[in-house]
Image: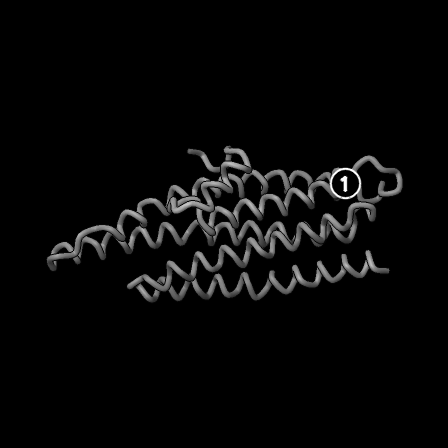
């Protein structure tokens, strides 16, 4: 099953079941794609309007970037499921002998690193999307600015959600040097882009409340 192509109803149904995938990582990628699309809608409603002719080139540029990010985040919905499946199987490997334990540790370590990589990539894409929302909120049509506010909230939720899927995997790693390096990078993304998302949201709220 390709989770980036199924219906919303089917995705939510499988997500709420005991099936190991999709999980929080895939859901975060989907939420990030939706958030990015909301910003893109602001741009679509701005392009071609005489009132916003001075930002036409910016909106065209943002549209191309948002389209790319939407596609990449949707692809990561499926990739997250694909990378988690080997890890799910690794947890069930036998460990009755020292040899079996060593083999399980070896397979687990590789599977943990692979499973960790996708949510970190989701975070990177969401960070890019948050920067786009900043421009959409500042330059886009005031009639649609609320959608930029909703979009940035979704992108922040996806950023934070994906971080938890990084941390749960790094926690189980035996290679602590590798794990701590990924944790530092994850902390840095959260530390920079979650506050930025908050500022963008507050800016949008200020515009709406007047």
* Residue depicted at 40% across the width and 54% down the height: 116
Name the one closer to the observer, 138 or 14.
Answer: 14
Q: Position of residue 123 (x, y in %)?
A: 52, 54
Left or right: 189 with respect to 184? Answer: right
Label total for image: 1
Name the one closer to the observer, 209 or 183.
Answer: 209
Above-or-below relation of 116 to 76: below
Left or right: 175 with respect to 149? Answer: left
In the orientation shown, which residue stands out farthest toward the right?
A: 51
**Residue at image mark 1:** 57
Left or right: 141 with respect to 196? Answer: right
Q: Position of residue 170 (x, y in %)?
A: 37, 61
* Residue depicted at 48% across the width and 62% down the height: 185
Q: Position of residue 8 (x, y in %)?
A: 55, 37
Within-10-Å neighbours for mark 1: few <14, some 14–19, many 20+: few
* Residue depicted at 46% across the width and 45% down the height: 15
Of the 4 image quadrants, the one containing the N terminus is top left
What coloring was used for the rendering? one colour
Name the one closer to the observer, 92 or 113.
Answer: 92
Quadrant of the rendered image containing residue 38: top right
Of the 4 image quadrants, the one containing the C terminus is bottom right
Quadrant of the rendered image containing residue 196: bottom right
Above-or-below relation of 200 to 36: below
Query: Judging from the image, what secondary structure is the residue with disc 1 in?
Result: helix
Name the one closer to the observer, 53 or 115.
Answer: 115
């Amino acid at each position: 099953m390709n989770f980036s192509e199924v219906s919303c109803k089917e995705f939510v149904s499988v997500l709420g079941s005991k099936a190991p995938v999709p999980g929080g990582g895939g859901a975060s990628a989907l939420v990030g794609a939706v958030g990015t699309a909301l910003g893109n809608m602001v741009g679509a409603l701005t392009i071609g309007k005489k009132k916003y002719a001075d930002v036409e080139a910016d909106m065209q540029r943002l549209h191309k970037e948002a389209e790319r990010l939407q596609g990449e985040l949707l692809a990561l919905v499926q990739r997250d499921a694909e990378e988690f499946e080997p890890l799910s199987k690794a947890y069930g490997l036998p460990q009755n002998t020292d040899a079996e334990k060593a083999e399980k540790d070896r397979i687990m370590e590789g599977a943990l690193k692979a499973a960790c990589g996708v949510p970190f990539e989701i975070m990177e894409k969401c960070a890019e999307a948050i920067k786009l929302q900043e421009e959409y909120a500042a330059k886009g049509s005031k009639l649609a600015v609320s959608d930029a506010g909703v979009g940035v909230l979704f992108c922040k939720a996806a950023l934070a959600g994906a971080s938890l899927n990084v941390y749960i995997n790094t926690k189980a790693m035996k290679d602590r040097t590798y794990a701590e390096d990924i944790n530092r990078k994850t902390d840095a993304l959260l530390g920079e882009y979650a506050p930025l998302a908050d500022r963008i949201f507050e800016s949008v709220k200020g515009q709406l409340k007047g």
